[in-house]
Amino acid sequence: MLEHRSSLSLVATTAAVTAFLLVAVPAGHAQKIICWKDKTGKVIGCGDRVPPEFLQNETKTLDSRGITRQTTVSAQEAARLREEDQKKAALKAEEDRRISEQRRQDAALINTYTSAKEIDVRRDRELQVVELQIQQLTATRKSAADTYAAQQRRHDDFAKTGKPVPDAVKNDLKRATDEKDRVEAQIAEKEKDKERISTSYAQQKARFLELKGLPAPAAATAEANPAPKK
């Protein structure tokens, strides 16, 4: 019932505006009238200009025959549309940057290597450097662990006497602990470096083969398509 009344009200408003134009506007004179709406989209008034308090609302412009010639959205809707357009533009710009960067990387890949074997050689060379660093750090870790163990025993011996542990002993133990932890952290980071190197070169190799139109290595194919379990 309410929807029926709203429809009748809208029809009545449009009819009234059309009648007004036909009566008030002399023949041969082009005339327009603007109708403004409330926040729900319902026409609440018409005239030759929009009242100041409704300037931010949605409007529609009618010609002398009552035909809608122009519509405008509300300020709130316009802001929403602008924000939506800005988001779309940002996404497109990001996609354009991604495509541009991919093309740059592809060109560098093709210009750097002539075969997939060269990629493997370079990967192995970098992994070897990191592995040597890990070996050196492992030796340092053993020394740091021995020093820590000695300082811990020294600290415990003082503690067993029931007397306060000297600050110098506490400080020596702290330095030994910090050094042991520092070396452990360095080794862990080098292990991550090995993983990053392997992953990076695997991706480069796969992309190189794709750009060259060559098949993936048998091992890579087997990993991608494991045999079904019996």
Image (cartoon, rainbow, N blue to C red):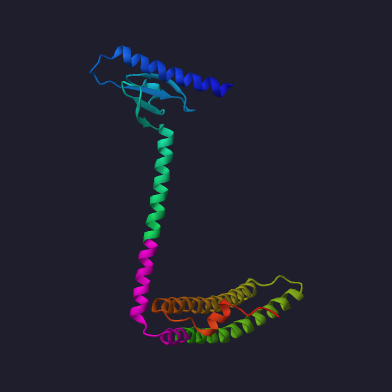
Q: Which residue is situated farthest in the left direction here?
A: 28
Q: Is residue 136 magenta-colored?
A: no
Query: Looking at the picture, how far across and down is residue 228, in whole percent?
Result: 66, 78
* Above-or-below relation of 70 to 44: below
State left or right for residue 171 relative to residue 119. Answer: right
State left or right for residue 161 relative to residue 42. Answer: right
Q: Quadrant of the N terminus?
A: top right
Q: Residue at x 43, y 34 (%)?
A: 76
Q: Main SS of the magenta segment?
A: helix
Q: Which residue is situated farthest in the top direction here?
A: 23
In the depicted view, which residue is nearer to us: 97 or 41?
A: 41
Q: Residue at x 35, y 78 (%)?
A: 110
* Above-or-below relation of 95 to 131: above
Q: Is residue 119 magenta-colored?
A: yes
Query: Looking at the picture, how far across and down is residue 82, in whole percent?
Result: 39, 42
Query: Looking at the picture, how far across and down is residue 88, in whole percent?
Result: 41, 50
Q: Which residues are magenta?
A: 97-124
In the depicted view, which residue is nearer to us: 176 or 15?
A: 15
Q: Quadrant of the C terminus?
A: bottom right
Query: Looking at the picture, how far across and down is residue 103, in whole percent?
Result: 36, 69
Q: Residue at x 47, y 28 (%)?
A: 41
- Marks counted in the figure total 0
Q: Residue at x 36, y 18 (%)?
A: 18
* Above-or-below relation of 63 to 135: above
* Above-or-below relation of 41 to 178: above
